[in-house]
Image (cartoon, grey):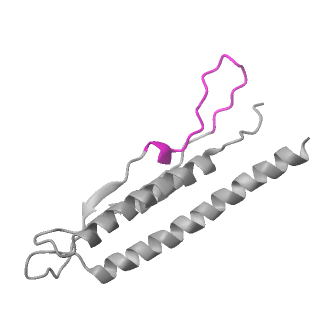
């Protein structure tokens, strides 16, 4: 029976989500930078649906290695190979010059994204703290 993994899928998934959040931060920053650019269309990074699908997808029966010569299942969840989509934000109201950036909406997205990133960072820090405690107590 294989032993526990030091860095499990949860840690890698949080890392990937934080990468997505960083990408969203960059896209929202770009939107805010172009709020006065004529014809600029606001964009967003969509990854929440990808996350839900990766987490809830049934993978069938788990494979167990009963012999060291068996092929390893890998154990990585699908989120590790997914890519977020950058999409144009549909806005019913555009300014007279065709710009679709709403500064208020973009600032709200930036704030929400920052809070979620901070929460995910805290979860990862606690996971690493647990590993540190296990290592220090196991001397």
Residue closer to the observer: 79 or 97 = 97
Residue closer to the observer: 81 or 26 = 26
Query: Left or right: 124 with respect to 43?
Result: right
**Which quarter of the image is occupied by the C terminus?**
top right
Q: Position of residue 82 (x, y in %)?
A: 42, 46
**Which quarter of the image is occupied by the N terminus?**
top right
Q: How many marks?
A: 0
Query: Left or right: 57 with respect to 82?
Result: right
Look at 52% across and 72% down and name the residue there: 115
Residue 122 occupies quadrant: bottom right
Residue 2 to residue 28: above or below: above
Look at 8% across and 82% down and name the residue there: 96
Residue 85 lies in the magenta stretch: no
Evaluate whether residue 46 shows in this view: no
Residue 98 to residue 5: above or below: below
Look at 43% across and 62% down and name the residue there: 48
Q: Position of residue 69 (x, y in %)?
A: 66, 16
Dominant secondary structure (helix, strand or loop) of the stretch shown in magenta: loop
Evaluate whether residue 8 shows in this view: yes
Residue 31 occupies quadrant: bottom left
Q: Position of residue 124 (x, y in %)?
A: 64, 57
Q: Position of residue 7 (x, y in %)?
A: 67, 43
Which residues lie in the magenta part? 62-81
Residue 70 lies in the magenta stretch: yes
Look at 39% across and 74% down and name the residue there: 109
Hey, which residue is sitting farthest top in the picture? 69
């Amino acid at each position: 029976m294989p032993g526990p993994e030091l860095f499990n899928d949860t840690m890698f998934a949080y890392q990937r989500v934080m990468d997505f959040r960083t990408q969203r931060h960059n896209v929202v920053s770009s939107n805010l930078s172009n709020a006065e650019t004529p014809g600029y269309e606001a964009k967003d990074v969509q990854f929440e649906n990808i996350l839900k699908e990766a987490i809830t997808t049934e993978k069938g029966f788990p494979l167990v290695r009963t012999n060291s010569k068996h092929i390893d299942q890998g154990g990585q969840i699908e989120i590790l190979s997914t890519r977020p989509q950058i999409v144009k934000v549909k806005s019913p109201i555009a300014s007279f010059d065709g710009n679709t950036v709403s500064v208020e909406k973009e600032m709200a997205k930036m704030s929400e994204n920052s809070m979620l990133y901070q929460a995910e960072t805290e979860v990862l820090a606690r996971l690493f703290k647990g590993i540190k405690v296990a290592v220090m107590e196991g001397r």
